[in-house]
Image (cartoon, grey):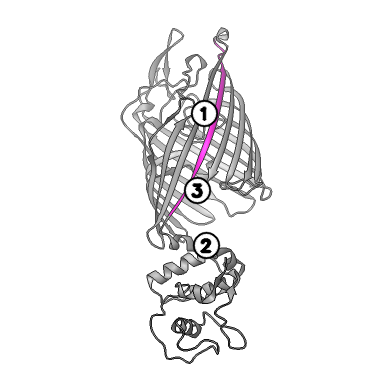
Amino acid sequence: MKKTLVSALTTALVVGAASTTFAAANPFTDLPADHWAYDAVTQLANEGIVEGYGDRTYRGDRNITRYEMAQMVAKAMAKQDVSAATKALIDKLAAEFSEELNNLGVRVSNLEKHADMVQWTGKLEYTYHNFRQKDALHEQSGKLKDTVNGYVFRLEPKAEVNDHWTVNARLDAVGSLNHDTTTDVHLERAWAQGDYNNFQVKLGKFEFNPEQEHGLLWDTEVSGAEMTFGKDLTFALMGGRLADDKVYPGVRWASKYSPSAYQTDVFYDSGEDPATVFGVRLQYDKGSKLYGGVGFYHIKDGDLKGTKATIDGSTHVISPYSHDGNSTTDKASIWTVNAGYRFSDKANLWANYARNTKADIEKTSWQAQFDYGNYTDRPEKGAWGVFLAYRQFGYNTTFQGTMYDDALRGTKGWAIGAKYAPFKNVGLIAKYFNGKTITSHDKVEKLFGRVEFFF
């Protein structure tokens, strides 16, 4: 992009405060005092934003390069006493010339949020699930199958409140390619976040997916509050409510599979009470090779009480608890531990373990995974990644984990996967799971594919 120097300056290029006439001496021999841009150029020269050439000429009719433009913007950025309108203009120019400013050593990481108080990002993803499960109790029924094709259109606005606080949200519209249906856009998350030195607080409905737990227990939203203290060694304290359909006990049993319901083998009486959850986590991660942490979650929900269900003509109490054949408690207590080792910036080995101390069946969950590659969200062109994992998602421990990408809740087995970015901000993901249900030992297979577009 090229513009003449006079045009760039007189379209409120840098400071925009040139309405006042100054009596300073003419700094340039080729700029007459009666020139229409004389006052603006003189002020900018006096403030050290434009310098002209060594022969004291201004050459205002010459086209300038982006690099020269960035030099003037950098000098304008150093000015402190400017109006709000001028500051907003400087920020917009800095965003336009960010690459050149970075080459000059000028940091522009915070410019975008000042140039526009609300940032909009999002993604569009298409997902394919193919699920197959063999009924060990009824061989004649063969395999139970289900295929789900769908998409999600997501918007994630982020608004700056002040230097420490932002307001954030997530809005989703979900569609089915199987049935050509689409939901209205609905609000998934809305929270305020305060970021200070070694302290962060979240208030509202926010993501509940602790990073180093890798979705073993939680990959959902919680309404409440969370506070995190520390830098390399962090302590997190959270409490809030989960929607009523987020927590319930049961087992996965092929003979009771319900196609497309995606809640296979769940036997429970759904109440109207939301789950109350309280959690604490201690995590060490200095960015070096070794990291790890521990956590504890206490849950209270009436749906955790036992429910009698008839399976193959027999009555069973389907509950994570057994108290003389019936459950009388509505609580769960889950302990977690995680550890990992980074071999390099591309190779990472990690594992998680969790146990519900109040459960009697499917009371443990664990997973171990080796990742290799450089694929991240909003990937660069050519980014890629592969993984190999073993997972066990106990039905009465993994209540709302990442349990539909490969392994399912109530299953255990091996998973493999790969990711690749053919273009910038475009990702292709494929995963395969092969295992069996934990309680009934039915064979389970899962094929997962996704195309995602970030913007």
Q: Is residue 178 visible?
A: yes
User: How would you rate the neighbour count of disc 2 (Cα within 10 Å): few for under 14, some for 14-19, many for 20 or more?
Assistant: few
User: What separation in Å lies between label 1 and label 2 (alpha carbons)?
Assistant: 38 Å
Going from N to C along the chain, the mark reached first, 1 or 3, is: 1
Q: Which quadrant would residue 422 be assigned to in this image?
A: top right
Residue 311: image x %, image y %? Answer: 45, 12
Q: Are marks 2 and 3 in contact (CB under 8 Å)?
A: no
Can residue 123 be found in the magenta stretch?
Answer: yes
Q: Which residues fall within the magenta stretch?
A: 119-137
User: How would you rate the neighbour count of disc 1 (Cα within 10 Å): few for under 14, some for 14-19, many for 20 or more?
Assistant: some
User: What separation in Å lies between label 2 and label 3 (alpha carbons)?
Assistant: 30 Å
Mark closer to the observer (2, 3): 2
In what element is the residue under mark 1? Answer: strand
Going from N to C along the chain, the mark reached first, 1 or 2, is: 2
What residue appears at the point 49 percent right and 88 percent down from the top-left corner?
32
Residue under label 2, please give it: 109
Q: Which quadrant would residue 64 be assigned to in this image?
A: bottom right
Outermost residue, left side: 272
Residue under label 1, please give it: 149
Residue 31: image x %, image y %? Answer: 52, 86
User: How would you rate the neighbour count of disc 3 (Cα within 10 Å): few for under 14, some for 14-19, many for 20 or more?
Assistant: some
* Amino acid bearing label 1: Asn
* Amino acid bearing label 2: Ser
Mark closer to the observer (1, 3): 1
* Amino acid bearing label 3: Leu
Can residue 357 be found in the magenta stretch?
Answer: no
Mark closer to the observer (1, 2): 1
Going from N to C along the chain, the mark reached first, 2 or 3, is: 2
Residue under label 3, please give it: 282
